[in-house]
Structure formats: structure tokens, C-alpha cells
Amino acid sequence: MAKDESTGDAATEEKKPAAPVDDFRTTQHAITVDGQELAYTATTGRVVLRQEVFTDGKFDGHQPKAEVFLTAYTLDGADAGERPVTFAFNGGPGSSSIWLHLGLLGPRRVVSGDAGELAPPPYTLVDNTETLLRHSDIVFIDPVSTGYSRAVEGEKPGEYHGFTRDLESVGEVIRLWTSRSGRWMSPKFLAGESYGTTRAAGLASHLQERYGMYLNGVMLISSVLEFGTLDFSPGNDLPYTLYLPTYAAIAHYHGLIPDRSLDELLADAERFAAGRYPNALAQGNRIPADYRAEVVTRLAELTGLSEDYIDRVNLRIEHGRFFAELLRSRRQVVGRLDGRFVGWEADSGGERQGTDPSFSAIIGPYTAALNHYVRVELGYENDLPYESLNFEAAKNWSFKEFEGQQITVADKLAEAMRVNPHLKVHVASGRYDGATPYFATESTLSRLQIPAELVGNIETKYYPAGHMMYVHDESRAQQSADLAAFIQSSSNR
């Protein structure tokens, strides 16, 4: 009996997964700003990333590797060549772009409330009349394994959970969108928050080197460019000094240092953190008793902690312990992302903060709003869970490129600025940010290897809020104005 070759081939074909395709949805919207209507187009969905495959030097085609979710907003009727475009993402690593999207930059925002007056569920979406869309088109990108972004069937998502592969995949999304939208001649910006600033600094260099794509500006919100400034590890005393002004700000906010203005207190804390304090830590056990006693007293005055506690921790106040200790007498812990927030633990005697009350306050409103907004208002349907934060990806994130050395992208940002002297950098920090303290950011910026002629390309802004400073309405309004001014001044039009 003859073998039916066609049947065998058909069976084989049936077993193969369908090739992934882009699945964008396009909708039309309008927002009224200062009495004028801004009509815009929203494009939402997943773009397929493909990799050129070679076997024994022979080109075998473009293999699908991942599907990356993005939401792009473009102003109707604008000149694409003149109109700036901003590529935005958050950090984690393992975070979607939900926070910048619905908190600060997008045309719609969630009303989440603020410290001491949180909004109850169900939550509200409103027009964001301060949206960056007034001045720039915006593309929000969710890296692989965040949002609705996933590796395609048969591929390993873990390959994207690392420094280099993350840069390459997000950079490829930027290249694809720019090319398909005809925007190579548009002024181009990156906006990153938290680990997104690590990504943005790396991308500024990567986009130049890999694609010849030069940027007009990079917006760094709650920055981490040198991980050693934040890493409370044995033998590294640097974070203890760089966190001190943030400790002082948080203590002041909660009324523990009532007789001084915040500005006066921070100036004092910064001077001590840059001088006597690191000198004392560097002396170790050689420090004279009277000098040590002086440092204990000064730290107590600046942080609101007791002299006994500071003495017992050997002058070294670790941040997780600070968040638990500061309001221990009130049976409360303060927030890490935003020290203005307070909460409770099951055990008020714990050494470190267990749950961050500032994160707990915002995850619910943002997640509910995004899931409603994407499906109901933007018309994109996907039954996958929207991964606002992928903790598994964060836990297993690879920095193998930095084995045996400090994790830093300060060198990459500096290189990008030296190669492209027109590149401008905007840096935003919250005074009460206990995740990426502002004084650590200042320390990194002060040591960037750039010529004096380029120092003026960097601007710094500060807000009386935390890591996501835009949850504070006054800060959000001011930050929106500052970003708009930065885009306008850096577009070279």
C-alpha cells in the first residue's frame, strides 16, 4: 500500500503553532486643553520581534522571538517631521509602563489619591489635561514578560530578563516603530523611571551604536545609574551617606524635626553626608570616642532616630531598617517608594519594613484602571493577565555583563553625550523617595565623565513627593510643565 506523503505533511503542519502577527487596534479620541480640542489617534497592541537566523553562515530567515505590547499616541494633523516623539517605559526590572502611562504622561490618568487621602475602589479615570501629548507623540513600551508582552511559543522568556537582551529588545521596538511610522526625522526622546533610567541611559548609547539613531533628549525620573550607590552590602558604606538627606526629609515630613525648614534641614544633611559622616565611617574602629559620639548626636538630629539606636547599628542606618524604626513608637512603618505614606505590620517589633505602604496604595488603582482602559476605551482584547509588575522576572534578572564589577550605566550615558553633544538630559527626583534617593543621583551626575562644555546639557528638578512623584497633584502639575519645557527646548526646531 502506497504511503500518503501529503497526509503526513499536513499532519506535521497542523502541529506547528500559527506564526504570530501584529495585533494592533486603532481608535480615535480627543481631549480639551485650555479650551482647545486635541484630536489624537491611539494604536494599541503587540508587535512581533524577529531575529535574523543563520546556520553555518547561511541565512535562514527571520524567526519570531517575542511579542511586545505598546500603546502609541499620535496627534492628528501634525507634521510628522516636526513633531517630537517620546518612547516611555518604567523599570523594576519587571515593570510595565503602567505608571508613567496612567500617572503622568498619557492623555488619561487614574485618580489614586495621595498620602493620607487614598481613593477607595472602584477607581476613576479622567482626562489628563497636562499630558505630554500636547508637545510630543508618545509610545509606551512594556518589555518582555510585563504587561501583555510575552516570548512566542517555544522561546524562553528568561532570555529577555537581563541587562543586554532587554536593551536590544526595547531598542528594536523603538527602531521598528520609528521606521514604520516614518519618524526618523522627528525629534526623539526617551523617558524612563527607576530601572527605566538604567534602560534609558543604556539605550541612548545602544541606539547610537547599533542603528545610528541619535536622540534629542533623555528624561530620567527617579534615577539609578550606579547600583553601588544603593546597595547596602558588606564593605560598601556609600549608601549610608547618600541616603541620609532622604532620611532627614522623611523624618521632617512626619513631624520629628519640627523646628527647621525642610530646605535648611536638607542643606545641613547634605553637608554632613558629604563630609564628616563618610570620614567617620571610613575610620571604622579607629574613630576616636568623642568623634563617634559627635556623629551619633548629629545623625539623631538629622534623622529623628534615637541616639541609642544609631549607636547600636554602628552609625550605619540601612534603609529597610529606617522605614521600620522611624515611627515604631506609633506602631507604623513608612513607605519605601514614598516616605510620606504610612502603614501597619502584623508585628510592630520587626527589624525591617515588610510591606511597602506606598506601593500598596497605588498598585490597586493603576492595575484596575489599565485593565479597564485598554479593553473598554482602546478596544484591545487579550485574556492574558496584564503584568503590572513581574516579580519573578525581577528576582531572576541577570547582570552577567557586570560580573566582578559595579553595575553602572553612567559610563554609557556619558559616552552618548560625548558622541552626540546635542543630547540633553532631564533628571527628576522626589525628596521623599526611599528607593532611589536624590543625593545618590546627584553623586552620580557629579562624576559623569563628560567635558565641562556638556555639563550644562543636564538639568535637575526636585519635587516634594516620592519615587512616583506624580501621585502628588502639585508635583504632577509642576513635573508636567517641566517635561514640556524640556521637550520644547531640546527639539532643535
Image (cartoon, rainbow, N blue to C red):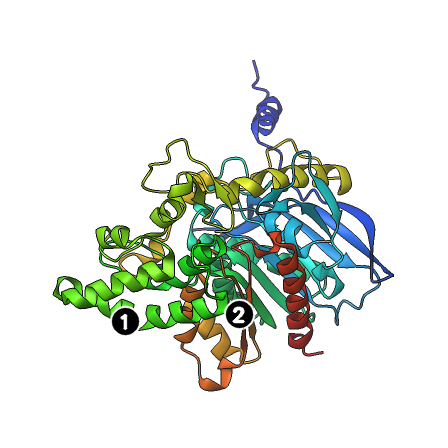
Q: Kindly identify the amino acid type of the residue bearing the numbered disc 1.
A: Arg
Q: Kindly identify the amino acid type of the residue bearing the numbered disc 2.
A: Gln
In the structure shown, which secondary structural element does the residue marked by tag 1 occupy? helix
Q: Nearer the viewer, residue 488 or 140?
A: 488
Whether residue 467 is visible here, answered yes or no, is yes
**Residue density around tag 2, few if under 14, some if 14–19, many if 20 or more, within 10 Å:** some
Whether residue 411 is visible here, answered yes or no, is no
Q: Quadrant of the N terminus?
A: top right
Q: Which of 181 and 18 is in front in this view?
A: 181
Residue 310, percent from left and from top: 27, 54
Q: In this view, does 330 lie above or below 97?
A: above
**Residue density around tag 1, few if under 14, some if 14–19, many if 20 or more, within 10 Å:** some
Q: Which residue in the rendered view is the most extreme toward the left?
A: 286
Find the distance from the CA under tag 2 to the CA under tag 1.
Answer: 42 Å
In the structure shown, which secondary structural element does the residue marked by tag 2 occupy? helix
Q: Mark 2 points at which residue?
A: 208
Q: Earlier in the sequence, mark 2 or mark 1?
A: 2
Residue 165, percent from left and from top: 46, 53
Q: In which quarter of the image is the C terminus?
A: bottom right
Residue 404, percent from left and from top: 26, 58
- Corner quadrant of residue 117: top right
Q: Is residue 69 above or below residue 259?
A: above
- Corner quadrant of residue 2: top right
Residue 427, percent from left and from top: 53, 67
Q: Nearer the viewer, residue 13 or 176?
A: 176
Q: In this view, does 294 lie to the left or right of 121?
A: left
Q: Is residue 46 left or right of residue 27?
A: left
Q: Which residue in the rendered view is the most extreme toward the top?
A: 1
Q: Name the residue under label 1.
A: 276
Q: Which residue in the rendered view is the most extreme toward the front?
A: 259
